[in-house]
Image (cartoon, helix red, strand yellow):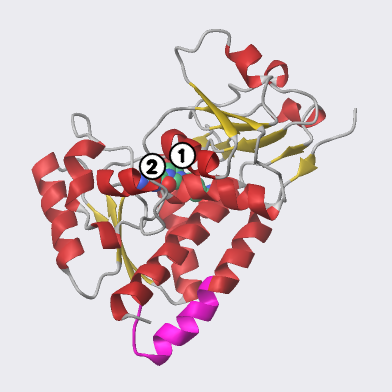
Amino acid sequence: MTAAHRIDGRVVAAEIDARTTDDMARLTAAGIVPTLAVVVPTHDEGTAWYVRSIARAGKRLGITCLVDTLHGADAATLAGHLKARSADPAVHGVICQTPLPAGVTLADLGTAIAPVKDVDGANPTSLGLLATGSAEAFAPATAQAVLEILRHEQVPLAGRRVVVVGRSTVVGKPAALLLLAEHATVTVCHSRSTDLPALCREADVLVAAVGRPGLIGVDHVRPGAVVVDVGTNPTPDGGLAGDVDPAVAAVAGALTPVPGGVGPVTTALLHRHTALAAARASGR
Ligand SMILES: Nc1nc(=O)c2c([nH]1)NC[C@@H]1CN(c3ccc(C(=O)N[C@@H](CCC(=O)O)C(=O)O)cc3)C=[N+]21
C-alpha cells in the first residue's frame, strides 16, 4: 500500500498570505492599519496555540492584533466587551475564542459581534447568510480552511460524496454549507450516528471535526479517499494531535497532517478576513 500524499497546509497558508500582503500594500498606502481584536474567555491549550499563531502571523503581515484576556468572565461582561470592540472604528475584525466559560453559549455572544467585523463567522446572521450562499458574510476561518485546502489540491467536489464528522456551529455545520455550495453530496455525522465507520467509508472526501484524538481510524477510510483532519487536540507532551489516527496514511489517497495542515490555513484566513473587512470599511 502506498502512503497518502501529505497535504502541506503551510504552502496553502503562504498562498493566502501572499494575497493578504497585496491588499496590505494598498491599505497601508492609504494609512489604514487592519486591526483584529481577539477575545480569550477561557484558559485552553488549543486556544493558546491558536492565539500565539494569530499574533505571530499578524506581526509578519502588519495586522495589529489586540488580545483581550477575560478568563472566566460572565456572558454579560463578554457580550459588552465584544460590543465595545465592534463599535471601535479602529478595529476591523473581532473574534471570540472557543471554548466559552461554563454556562455561556455562542448564542449569548454571537450577536454582540457586528456582522461586518465578524471575521470568524460567529454571529447567527453570518451563518444565515452562509446558508443562503451570500458572499457578504465571513465563514468561520476553520470551515473555510477545509475548502481552501481542497481547492488548492484540486480535489473535485461537484457530485462527490463528502462526509463531515462533527456538527459544531464553528466547523461542522458551516463546512457542510460551504461544501454544498460546491455541489458536493454532503453527509453530516456525529456522536449519535449509527455505524460511523460505514458512513465514513462512503466518503470520497472525509472531513474530521470532532475534537477527539484518533477517532477516525483505518476502518473509517475508503482506500484512496482525501482526508482533512480539523482536530487540534493538545497532547500530554505539549504537542497537537488530530482526530485522525496517523495509521490512516496507509489507506488514504491524501491526508492533512496535524500540525501543519488545517491550522496554518485557519490562521491565514482569519487575517485575510480582517484585511478584507478593513478594505470594505474604507471602500478600498
Ligand atoms: N472562535 C474560534 N475559532 C477557532 O478557529 C478556534 C477557536 N475559537 N478556539 C480554539 C481553536 C483551536 N484553533 C487552532 C487553529 C490553528 C492552530 C494552528 O495553527 N496550529 C499550528 C501550530 C501552531 C503553532 O505552531 O504555534 C498547526 O496546526 O500547524 C491551532 C489551533 C482554532 N480554534
Give the percent coordinates (x, y) of residue 129.
34, 48
In which quadrant is the N terminus drawn?
Answer: top right
Height in image: 275 above or below 167?
below
- Can the viewer see residue 74 in this picture? no
Judging from the image, what secondary structure is the residue with disc 2 in?
helix
CB atoms of marks 2 and 1 within 8 Å: yes
- The earlier-in-sequence mark between 2 and 1 is 2
Q: Amino acid at mark 1?
A: Leu
Give the percent coordinates (x, y) of residue 215.
58, 21
Viewer-proximal residue, 71 or 175? 175
Height in image: 163 above or below 67?
above
Q: Which residue is depicted at the point 43% across and 40% down?
A: 174
3D distance between C-alphas at marks 2 and 1? 6 Å
The residue that mark 2 highlights is: 131
The residue that mark 1 highlights is: 177
Height in image: 190 above or below 49?
above
Q: Which residue is depicted at the point 63% across and 20% down?
A: 200
In which quadrant is the C terminus drawn?
Answer: bottom left
Report the span colored magenta: 20-34
Is residue 220 left or right of 99 when viewed as pictured?
A: right
Q: Which residue is depicted at the point 74% across and 31% down?
A: 225
